[in-house]
């Protein structure tokens, strides 16, 4: 095997351009074309591909070495740049090639389990098992490098705006944050455990108490929860906190960040200020607190039109305090055959709805699933209210609003995807004025919708003890194309009010002291008003890379059962390690 001695890389493969220049490049063999007296090798690195040329003028020993090369061999090559006879417009260096005068084979390679190509049909499991090979593919390399650029622009922006980057601990005390903690046993303190942080929430608030009025961190966070395409057990958060601010101040800083980021990374202009919707408006119009506003198909309320009709499903829902609402899929009658509507009905039943009423308008007269219960003028009033026409399909759900709204929100997203009507744009949105509490039917208690350190609206303080459902939080989420990017709030800084919020959540004095005592104590020594948010760097990168999965922007991702296929993590540990921790593994019955 050759060594690098005497050779130093002067150029990346994709940057070679000047004809007549002497260059040295290094990389992986992408492809070899051996034509007997001519050999061409495509050499690849993270910047692109350059063609190495060997012909009758090449030194014999160099030519023979070139003939030995195979795919994925690691080479260094020195030579002179010359114009190519057969140009390749598909690559950046397609007008030139390197006539090689010196060649080193630095590492041989076995035949890889799959070909390293831009597009691949190889199953994901195999690619994740050999992730280091999968990461050689240009699309993934481009994604990882774009993510790196996002991180750099992020730091530059917040540094330029007076923020201080401070690291917070990775091993902390377990506190309730909404998901399961990953826990770490302590060898020294037998029977006690650290938790990996779900977010640096408490620490960044303590940094405000400490006087660091503008904090930023690209924080690693951990949540032991079920995975999906936009979720990983470990993720990165652009975590920020500010003192002496209100909601508008925080939103302005975040909006400036978004505008700067999209301009510098994608050369996209984002118009400011970003649109704002209250939680109530978002739910009633889109059926989601993270609505995708790139297309219409908004939810419409027809309760007033059907409250006295002869259809018991509609009237019963209204009498029980619910509503009857609809979405209209324009020009969808050809797509939504009766069979497809049956599938949609099964879909909504799977997410908690009792059923689905519909109108499919294909002929001059609409095909209405509930027509026999309604008068002609009642149906006509519904069609007029909804703006429905021939060729449209109407989906209607009747129930309590907590069923109706998310069901129609899910129908809206599913229909838009099936109809392919979602434009390729970036639609940002602030969702504001969240309810402070949400009722947990399993426990019979009120839980904090964001976290217990969120400040309620001043005018809602009187409802804490009497009407928790009326308490509105000074909370705000940043949404992009139907994905929640950020969740934030103004924090409580009065220790008496904080204790009152804990009481409203049903926490005992002992639980408060055990879980949050140090934070409540800190407020007794003077805490400036503050607030902040955490922006999901992974999700942001995923959308900016036009990808559907976090795996595409994560170097070594986990799969759905939270394992990593390449290293086989998690794995067993030696019994001696468990003995040191006084831990015994007991098989589940």
Image: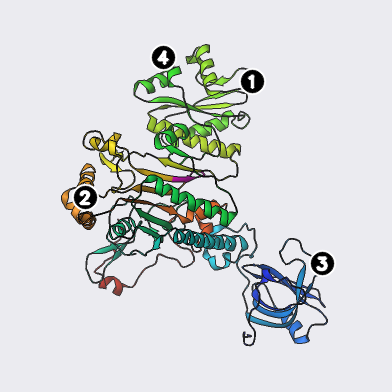
Q: What secondary structure is the stretch in magenta mostly built from?
A: strand
Q: From where the camera sits, is residue 10 visible?
A: yes
Q: Position of residue 311 (x, y in %)?
A: 44, 17
Do the residues bearing badges 2 and 1 touch, measured as CB atoms within 8 Å? no
**Of 496 and 396, the residue lying toward us:** 496
N-term mark: 3 or 2: 3
Residue 294, relative to residue 494: is it above or below?
Answer: above
Q: CA distance from mark 3 to mark 2?
A: 75 Å
N-term mark: 4 or 1: 4
Q: Given this view, does label 3 or label 2 mark the residue nearer the observer?
A: 2
| Quadrant for the N terminus in the image | bottom right
Q: Position of residue 497 (x, y in %)?
A: 22, 45
- For disc 3, the marked residue is 86
Residue 576, relative to residue 439: is it above or below?
Answer: below
Determine whether, in the image, residue 580 is placed left or right of residue 260: left
Q: CA distance from mark 4 to mark 1?
A: 28 Å
Q: CA distance from mark 1 to mark 3?
A: 59 Å
Determine whether, in the image, residue 442 is placed left or right of residue 37: left
Q: Residue at x 58, y 40 (%)?
A: 422
Residue 165, relative to residue 450: is it above or below?
Answer: below
N-term mark: 4 or 3: 3
Q: CA distance from mark 4 to mark 3?
A: 78 Å
Q: Given this view, does label 2 or label 4 mark the residue nearer the observer?
A: 2
Identify the mark at residue 308; answer none if there is no mark.
Answer: 4
Label 4 residue SS: loop
Q: From where the camera sits, is residue 406 visible?
A: no
Q: Which residues are magenta?
A: 478-482
Q: Position of residue 419 (x, y in %)?
A: 60, 36
Q: CA distance from mark 2 to mark 4?
A: 52 Å
Label 1 residue SS: loop
């Amino acid at each position: 095997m050759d060594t690098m001695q005497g050779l130093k890389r002067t150029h990346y493969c994709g940057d070679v351009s000047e004809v007549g220049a002497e260059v040295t490049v290094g990389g992986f063999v992408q492809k070899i074309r051996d034509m007997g007296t001519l050999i061409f090798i495509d050499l690849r690195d993270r910047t692109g591909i350059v063609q190495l040329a060997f012909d009758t003028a090449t030194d014999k020993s160099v030519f023979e070495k070139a003939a030995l090369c195979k795919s994925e061999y690691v080479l260094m090559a020195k030579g002179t740049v010359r114009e190519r006879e057969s140009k390749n417009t598909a690559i950046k260096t397609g007008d030139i090639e390197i006539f090689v005068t010196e060649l080193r084979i630095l590492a041989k390679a076995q035949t890889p389990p799959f070909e390293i190509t831009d597009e691949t049909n190889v199953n994901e499991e195999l690619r994740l098992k050999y992730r280091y090979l999968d990461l050689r593919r240009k699309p993934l390399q481009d994604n990882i490098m774009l993510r790196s650029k996002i991180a750099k622009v992020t730091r530059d922006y917040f540094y330029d705006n007076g923020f201080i980057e401070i690291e917070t601990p990775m091993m902390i005390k377990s506190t309730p944050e909404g998901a399961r903690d990953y826990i770490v046993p302590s060898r020294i303190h037998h029977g006690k455990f650290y938790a990996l942080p779900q977010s640096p929430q408490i620490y960044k608030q303590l940094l405000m108490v400490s006087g660091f009025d503008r904090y930023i961190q690209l924080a690693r966070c951990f949540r032991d929860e079920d995975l999906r395409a936009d979720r990983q057990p470990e993720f990165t958060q652009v975590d920020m906190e500010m003192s002496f601010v209100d909601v508008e101040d925080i939103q302005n800083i975040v909006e400036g960040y978004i505008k700067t980021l999209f301009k510098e990374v994608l050369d996209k202009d984002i118009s400011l200020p970003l649109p704002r919707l209250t939680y109530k408006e978002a739910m009633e119009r889109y059926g989601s607190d993270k609505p995708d506003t790139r297309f219409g198909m908004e939810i419409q309320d027809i309760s007033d039109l059907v409250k006295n009709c002869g259809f018991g499903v509609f009237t019963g829902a209204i009498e029980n305090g619910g509503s009857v609402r609809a979405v209209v899929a324009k020009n969808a009658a050809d797509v939504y055959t009766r069979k497809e509507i049956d599938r949609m009905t099964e879909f909504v039943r799977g997410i908690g709805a009792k059923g689905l009423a519909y109108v499919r308008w294909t002929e001059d007269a609409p095909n209405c699933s509930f027509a026999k219960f309604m008068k002609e003028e009642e149906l006509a009033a519904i069609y007029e209210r909804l703006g429905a026409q021939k060729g449209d399909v109407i989906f209607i759900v009747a129930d309590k609003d907590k069923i109706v709204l998310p069901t129609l929100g899910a129908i809206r997203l599913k229909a838009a995807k099936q109809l392919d009507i979602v434009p390729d744009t970036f639609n940002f949105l602030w969702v504001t004025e969240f309810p402070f509490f949400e009722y947990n039917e399993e426990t019979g208690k009120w839980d904090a919708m964001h976290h217990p350190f969120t400040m309620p609206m001043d005018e809602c303080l009187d409802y804490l003890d009497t009407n928790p459902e009326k308490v509105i939080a000074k909370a705000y989420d940043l949404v992009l194309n139907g994905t929640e990017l950020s969740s934030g709030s103004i924090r409580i800084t009065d220790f008496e009010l904080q204790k009152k919020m804990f009481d409203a959540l049903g926490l005992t004095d002992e639980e408060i002291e055990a879980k949050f005592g140090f934070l409540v104590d800190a407020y007794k020594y003077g805490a400036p008003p503050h607030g902040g948010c955490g922006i999901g760097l992974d999700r942001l990168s995923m959308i900016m890379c036009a990808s559907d999965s976090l795996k595409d922007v994560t170097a070594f991702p986990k799969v759905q059962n939270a394992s990593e296929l390449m290293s086989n993590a998690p794995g067993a540990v030696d019994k001696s390690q468990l003995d040191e921790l006084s831990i015994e593994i007991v098989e589940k019955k």
